[in-house]
Image (cartoon, helix red, strand yellow):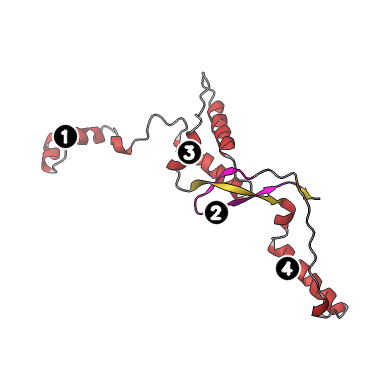
Amino acid sequence: ISSIREVARRFNVPFSSLRNRLTGIENRSDLRANSHKLTEIEEESLQKWILSMDLRGAAPRPSTVRGMANLLLEKRGTTPVLSVGEKWVYNFMKRRPLLSSRFSKRYNYERAKCEDPKIITEWFNLVQKIVLQYRIDPDDIYNFDETGFAMGLTATTKVITRSEYYGRRPVLQPGNRE
């Protein structure tokens, strides 16, 4: 085979497509749209940050994600400084199947610590030790609970989180119950 045209004919491929691939031009359907303000690497980093924050119980709000995207654009040092639009976060989530938005629920940090298996196990071991030490009859054990106002908690809000979660996401809040 002596020419590109002959190869294209033999394999029933458009000549222009074969020539473009040989010269390094990518297929249009495989290209990333020029309208994306962040690079693929920047978007990947932003997604990792969101997932990291979510694992820590502090899933970011859409406005926080937007602010982080604008910070990434600002750090490029271009003039004029670019910024993402109001609906950018929702379009970003459409491109990222791992992410979705959910409504959060208030969740006090002190209460979350009580769900740590290590702390729970230690507490039950302590109770068992006291019951045995003082020979407390199980019928003499009562459950007491305190209620009060949740201080320092924010209202239910929309957050960006892993798409595999269902329902409302607990967001840890620094605060105490008084």
Name the residue tied to disc 4: 121
Q: Is residue 165 magenta?
A: yes
Q: CA distance from mark 1 to mark 4?
A: 70 Å
Circles 2 and 3: CB atoms closer than 8 Å: no
Q: CA distance from mark 4 to mark 2?
A: 28 Å
Q: CA distance from mark 3 to mark 1?
A: 40 Å
Choose the circle earlier in sequence order: 1 or 2.
Answer: 1
Tell me if residue 119 can be seen. yes
Tell me if residue 3 can be seen. no
Choose the circle earlier in sequence order: 1 or 4.
Answer: 1
Question: Type of residue at label 2?
Answer: Gly
Name the residue tied to disc 2: 167
Residue 71, image x, y percentages: 57, 30
Choose the circle earlier in sequence order: 2 or 3.
Answer: 3
In this picture, which residue range is highlighted in magenta? 156-175
Name the residue tied to disc 3: 90
Q: Nearer the viewer, mark 1 or mark 2?
A: 2
Crowdedness near tag 3: few (<14), some (14–19) or many (≥20) residues, C-alpha within 10 Å: some
Q: CA distance from mark 2 to mark 3?
A: 18 Å
Q: Is residue 100 magenta?
A: no
Question: Type of residue at label 1?
Answer: Phe
Quadrant location, the N terminus = top left
Q: Nearer the viewer, mark 4 or mark 2?
A: 2
Name the residue tied to disc 1: 15
